[in-house]
Image (tube, helix red, strand yellow):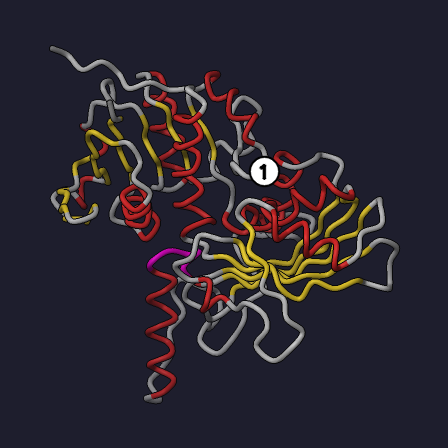
Amino acid sequence: MGFKVAVVGATGNVGREMLNILEERGFPIDEIVALASRRSQGTEVSYGDRTLKVKALDTYDFSDTDICIMSAGGNVSKEWSPKIGKQGCVVIDNSSAFRYDQDVPLIVPEVNPDAISLFTRKNIIANPNCSTAQLVVALKPLHDAATIKRIVVATYQSVSGAGKDGMDELFTQTRAVFVADSVENKKFTKRIAFNVIPHIDVFLDDGFTKEEWKMVAETKKMLDPKIKLTATCVRVPVFIGHSEAVNIEFEKPITADEARDILREAPGCQVLDKREDGGYITPLESAGEDATFISRIREDSTIENGLSMWIVSDNLRKGAALNAVQIAELLVERGLIQPKKKAA
């Protein structure tokens, strides 16, 4: 028997990707429902070769739904996820609303699958921030081997991380530059076309942005609270795919060759690291792929037991939709959820 699954935010970039990945990976579904706000009611979205008509979230009854994958933003999740969970439906939430709640597990299946058993406290499981998800997939096997002390990371995050409006703004501004039209900033604080912006999310009192704080808090929660991490998060004029330049200090010695061998065997990782022209991954090649790609692995002679590397992943997939579906798969594989018996 398959499950009844609802996708909230089905008309957004990530929601559409969630529907695609559920179908691609053959998740055991008897019934799939696409949900969004009332203004999107009746909009059509694709699920494999089928077309689904979007229903309104605020009038939907979740009592016979097994899994709700939520990708409608933090405010919507704060309002609806607890209500849905209380109806006996497990919520997998892609927003930041519950990531730092100690009663809600924050899960990347390749990193901390055992923590998923805590979902019963609120019937909610949190999906991490897109930039953190790919980072911890690469860090986990290295941490197991040599124990990470400190991480310095600079991100190069694509505009799709800011949703459809971000992608539209890059396209519109790029076209305006080429035809010498005026360039308007709506989604971003400064022009994104042919530029980079060292600012994602709001500024905090200490000068870091909330995006940078998320990477610290989520890495500690999922991987190890003793790890020290500092980040600079930058928006770049790329449509899909987040990149990260990462410097890691370990407690134990580890060589670049050892790290390369470990990562080649690690779940979710793919190493593309040839010391030649083009022997590395870029976000363009990562788009549409499930793996977290690692390149430019090298030893850092300025610190003891240090490595530097380049990590790239499709932020709409591993950074959001794919990870959410993998969480649902983990629930099923571990027998933590059973399909509700349908009324006769």
For image coordinates 23% across by 33% down, the residue present is 57
Residue 162 occupies which quadrant of the picture? bottom left
Q: Is residue 24 above or below residue 186?
A: above
Location of residue 102 in the rendering, given as x and y in whole percent from the top left corner = 58, 24
Question: Looking at the rendering, in which quadrant would you find the N terminus?
Answer: top left
The quarter of the picture where residue 112 lies is: top right
Relative side of 61 to 21, left or right: left
Count of numbered badges drawn on the protein: 1
Q: Quadrant of the C terminus?
A: top left
Q: Amino acid at mark 1?
A: Val
The answer to whether 344 appears left or right of 287 in the picture is: left
Residue that appears at 41% across and 66% down: 239
Instruction: Tell me which segment is drawn in magenta.
Output: 160-164
Q: Residue 83's spot in the image, x, y percent?
A: 33, 21
- Image quadrant assignment for residue 75: top left
The residue pinned by badge 1 equals: 111
Q: Is 77 situated above or below 90?
A: below
Q: Secondary structure at mark 1?
A: loop
Across and down, in percent, residue 294 comes to 60, 59
**Which residue lies at the image location 56% right of the left edge and 64% below the top edge?**
156
Front one among 33 and 286:
286
In magenta stretch: residue 291: no
Residue 9 percent location from the top left of the image:
29, 42
Indicate left or right for 221 with 162 as reference.
right
Relative horizontal placement of residue 188, taking residue 141 as reference (left or right): left
